[in-house]
Structure formats: structure tokens, C-alpha cells
Image (cartoon, helix red, strand yellow):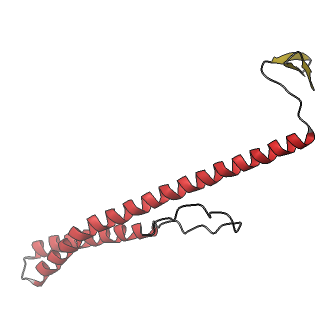
Amino acid sequence: MGRLVAGRAERFVRGRETLFEGRVRNMSESESRAEGGASAQGEEQLLRRAVAERDARLAEFADLAARVRHEINNPLTGLIGQAQLLLREELSEAARRRVLTIEQLANRIRDTVASLREIQQPPPRTPARPDEGANDPPRPRH
């Protein structure tokens, strides 16, 4: 329980009096409800901002994954192609095994890089309310 005494709020906690310095004022019931609504709106805005930041971060990761895939796949395609061309030639058994190993390892890298396709742009969110997102800037699509 608390009470207002000369600009200080006093509260009894487990039999001890605790003072809280600062401005204290009584609110009417309607003011209290309005402040609670404003608090909920502020909380909702914070959540929206956090979701937007998360979506932007996911989009950055998706862009990075696409660039990595591209940068690795270009030379990798050449490497696999050259290994396959070498395998058409007459090679010693030891050289053939080495080229097969190169091809197999390059194919493993290719498969690993292909799994980066799973990192996608987050799908556009559908507003919960018709007016939600009306003032938001359009999100870039890749």
C-alpha cells in the first residue's frame, strides 16, 4: 500500500517503510486507462520496430547467401568442368584417381553451396489490420 505525503510516495514493504523520491500525482481512472492505452501503443510500436529490424537483418543474410553462392559457384563450375574433361583423356590410374577425388570434392562443395538457397528473404508480412503498414515504405524484393 502507498500514500502521498508532501511530494513523496511512501510504501511499506514487509514492515519497513520505503521512500521513493520523485514526482507523484494522483490520476483519475480515465487518465490511468488512457496512459495504459498509450503504453500498449508504445509497446506495439517497439514490437513492430523489432520485427522490421529482424526482417531487414534476415534480408541482409539472404543477400549475403546469394552473393556467396554466386562467388563460389562460378569458379566451382569451371573446376568441375575441367575435371570432367581430364577424365575423358587417357590418364595413369593414379592421375585418374586424383582427378576423380577432385571432382567428388568439388561436387560436395557444390551441394553444400546449393543448401544456401534455403536462406530466403522473409515473406512479406500481411497486416493484421487494414490500416497497418499503410505508411510503411515498400520492401525491396530479390
**Image location (x, y in percent) of residue 113:** 35, 67
Q: Is residue 31 above or below residue 130?
A: above
Front-most of residues 10 and 133: 133
Front-most of residues 90 and 124: 124
Q: Residue furthest bottom?
A: 88
Which residue is at a point 57% across and 61% down the rendered structure image?
136
**Image location (x, y in percent) of residue 94:** 11, 72
Q: Quadrant of the N terminus?
A: top right
Q: Quadrant of residue 52?
A: bottom right
Which residue is at a point 43% across and 63% down the rendered structure image?
62
Front-most of residues 51 and 37: 37
Left/right placement of residue 91 relative to residue 134 reads left
Left/right placement of residue 77 relative to residue 2 reads left
Left/right placement of residue 37 relative to residue 122 reads right
Number of disc labels = 0
**Image location (x, y in percent) of residue 66:** 36, 66
Q: Quadrant of the C terminus?
A: bottom left
Which residue is at a point 49% across and 57% down the rendered structure image?
56
**Image location (x, y in percent) of residue 93:** 11, 76
Q: Quadrant of residue 36?
A: top right
Left/right placement of residue 132 relative to residue 30 reads left
Q: Is residue 71 above or below residue 87?
A: above
Q: Quadrant of residue 71?
A: bottom left
Q: Is residue 103 above or below residue 49?
A: below
